[in-house]
Image: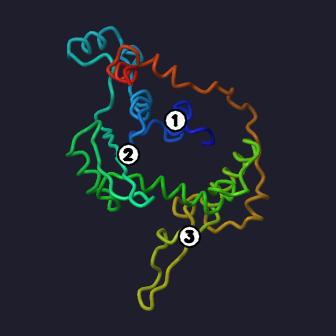
């Protein structure tokens, strides 16, 4: 997602992610302490009772159960990381649980096999990869983009190249024990989307056919619309106060 670092872009990022994952409930959401994240996460995965499409009998049972009018899935824990800089670099950080329980965090870490603390290392690694391959995103450089459309196009090319043309060391399976030999593969190969490493010539020459009946473009939602939707809930009240 290419855009300014503001609340409206955060809404577009989560809306896009929700659509791409088919509404899948993530095992854990971890961000920094940017205030808008909590509100946008509640808007993305939360639902009002009126939006559930309940029958009259189901609606009556819903009311008798004492459930709140605005429901957020209890399966999603959300935590933030407070980062402190030491000598111009990010040093120690402390975590805070915003939604969910400590038991959910411990279960997520046990099943992950990767991180054992709340952090944003995965998205930071993605940002670092983008800056490594995409000169337009380097800091303090003359290669910055003059037009957003070109910046968006180059960003898309880097995403496709990383997934289809770049062999990631951590994805290599061991093919032989002694001496150790590995089979290098790209993220697309690991996901079963292709059986070989793509060259840049193959990537740029791959034919793309636009859909016959493309879906109509929708106007991106704004943060103001998110606050309006959450108005009257605990999320909207907290957001409006902040």
Name the residue that disc number 1 marks: 10
| Mark sitting earlier along the chain (3/2) | 2
Comparing 47 with 194, the one in front is: 47
Q: How far across and down, in percent of the image, does residue 57 sit?
A: 29, 10
Q: How far across and down, in percent of the image, does residue 53 sit?
A: 41, 16
Residue occupying the point 47% across, 16% down: 228
Q: Are marks 3 and 1 in contact (CB under 8 Å)?
A: no
Q: Are marks 3 and 2 in contact (CB under 8 Å)?
A: no
Q: Is residue 197 left or right of residue 211?
A: left
Q: Is residue 67 left or right of residue 151?
A: left
Name the residue that disc number 2 marks: 30
Name the residue that disc number 3 marks: 185
> Rounded to the nearest whole Å, what is the CA distance between mark 3 and mark 2?
28 Å
| Mark whose residue sits in front, 3 or 1 | 1
Quadrant that contains the N terminus: top right
Q: Residues within 10 Å of mark 2 (few under 14, many from 20)?
A: many
Q: Quadrant of residue 115?
A: bottom left
Quadrant that contains the C terminus: top left
Residue occupying the point 64% across, 68% down: 197
> Rounded to the nearest whole Å, what is the CA distance between mark 2 and mark 1?
14 Å
| Mark whose residue sits in front, 3 or 2 | 2
């Amino acid at each position: 997602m290419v855009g300014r670092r503001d609340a409206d872009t955060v809404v577009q990022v989560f809306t896009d992610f929700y659509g791409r994952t088919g509404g899948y409930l993530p095992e854990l959401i971890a961000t920094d302490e940017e205030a808008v994240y909590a509100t946008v996460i509640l808007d993305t995965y939360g639902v009002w009772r009126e939006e559930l499409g309940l029958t009259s009998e189901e609606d009556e049972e819903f009311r008798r159960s004492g459930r709140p009018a605005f429901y957020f899935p209890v399966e999603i824990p959300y935590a933030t990381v407070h980062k402190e800089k030491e000598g111009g670099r990010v040093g120690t950080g402390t975590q805070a649980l915003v939604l969910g329980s400590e038991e959910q965090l411990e279960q997520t870490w046990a099943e992950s096999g990767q991180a054992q603390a709340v952090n944003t290392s995965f998205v930071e690694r993605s940002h670092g990869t983008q800056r490594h391959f995409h000169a337009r995103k380097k800091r303090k450089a003359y290669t910055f983009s003059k037009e957003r459309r070109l910046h968006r196009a180059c960003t898309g090319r880097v995403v496709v190249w990383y997934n289809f043309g770049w062999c990631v060391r951590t994805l290599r399976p061991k093919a032989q024990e002694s001496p150790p030999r590995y089979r290098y593969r790209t993220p697309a190969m690991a996901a079963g989307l292709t059986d070989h490493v793509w060259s840049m010539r193959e990537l740029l020459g791959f034919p793309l056919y636009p859909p016959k009946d493309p879906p109509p473009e929708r106007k991106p939602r704004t943060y103001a619309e998110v606050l309006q939707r959450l108005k009257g809930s605990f999320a909207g009240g907290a957001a409006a106060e902040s």
